[in-house]
Image: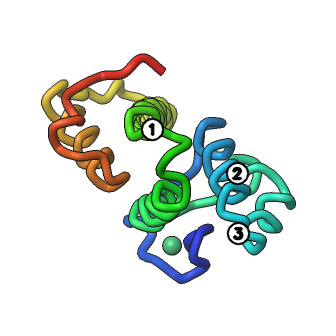
Amino acid sequence: MCFLCEKPSAESDLIEACTVGIDSRVRSVAHELGDFELISKLNTGDMIALGAEYNANCLAALYNRAREHDKEKSSEKNNQAMAHSITLTELICQIQDSRKEQPILPEFKLSDLKKEYCKRLAQQGVAEEARDTLYAP
Ligand SMILES: [Zn+2]
C-alpha cells in the first residue's frame, strides 16, 4: 500500500523509504502544505521506521503541490538538488540491499544505473535538461 495516497499498488511500483532525506523532505512539504492527514501519519513515526512504501508518482505529485504552493520561497534549483540527492541515495540504498540478499556480488553497469537514475528523476518531475547536472547536496 502506498503511504502517501493509501491506495493499494503493485509491489513492483512501490519504493521503500530508506533515507532520512525522504522523511524530512516529505515532513517539511506536509507542513508547508498544511496537509494534516499526512502530518498525523508522520507523527506516528518516521517513514523509515514505519517501513513506508510509496509510489514515485505520488511523491512527484506531492512535490509538485509543494512547488505550486511555494513558488517564490524555494527556487527550482533547490528542488532539483533535493530530487537529485534523494534519488541518488535511494539508488545506493537499493544497491546495498541487493548486495545483502545475494551472496554473489551483483554487477551494476554504470549505463544501467544512469538510466535508472534518470528515470527516477523524471518521476520526481525533474526536467530532462536538468537531469545530467549533478548538484552538490
Ligand atoms: Zn500513492
Residue beneath label 3, please?
A: 35
Find numbered disc 1 in the image and state the secondary structure of the residue it sits on. Answer: loop
Q: Type of residue at label 2?
A: Arg
Name the residue at 62% across, 68% down.
3
Counting labels gives 3
- Which residue is found at the position 54% from the left and 60% from the top? 69
Q: In the visual, does 136 lie left or right of 18?
A: left
> Mark 3 packing: few (<14 Cα in 10 Å), some, or many (20+)?
few
Write down the residue under mark 1. 75
Q: Residue at x 47, y 54 (%)?
A: 67
**Tag 2 near tag 3, CB within 8 Å:** no
Which kind of residue does numbered mark 3 sit on? Answer: Asp
Quarter of the image where one finds residue 103: top left
Q: Is residue 10 above or below residue 79?
A: below
Q: Residue at the location (76% across, 49% down)? A: 46
Mark 2 or 3: in front is 3
Question: Relative to the observer, which residue lies in front, 80 or 16?
Answer: 80
Label 1 CB, ligand 1: below 8 Å? no
Q: Residues within 10 Å of mark 1 (few under 14, many from 20)?
A: few
Q: Considering only order in the chain, which callout, 1 or 2, is on the residue closer to the N terminus?
A: 2
- In three-dimensional space, the C-alpha distance between marks 3 and 1, rounded to whole angstroms, equals 21 Å
> How far apart, in angstroms, are the residues tagged by discs 2 and 1?
18 Å
Give residue 58's position: percent from left, percent from top: 47, 67
Left or right of 81, for residue 132: left
Q: Nearer the viewer, mark 3 or mark 1?
A: 1
Q: Is residue 100 visible?
A: yes
Mark 3 or mark 1, which has the lower sequence index? 3
> In the image, residue 7 lies at what x, y percent?
55, 82
| Other-residue count near label 2 (Cα within 10 Å), few / some / many at <14 / 14–19 / ≥20 | many
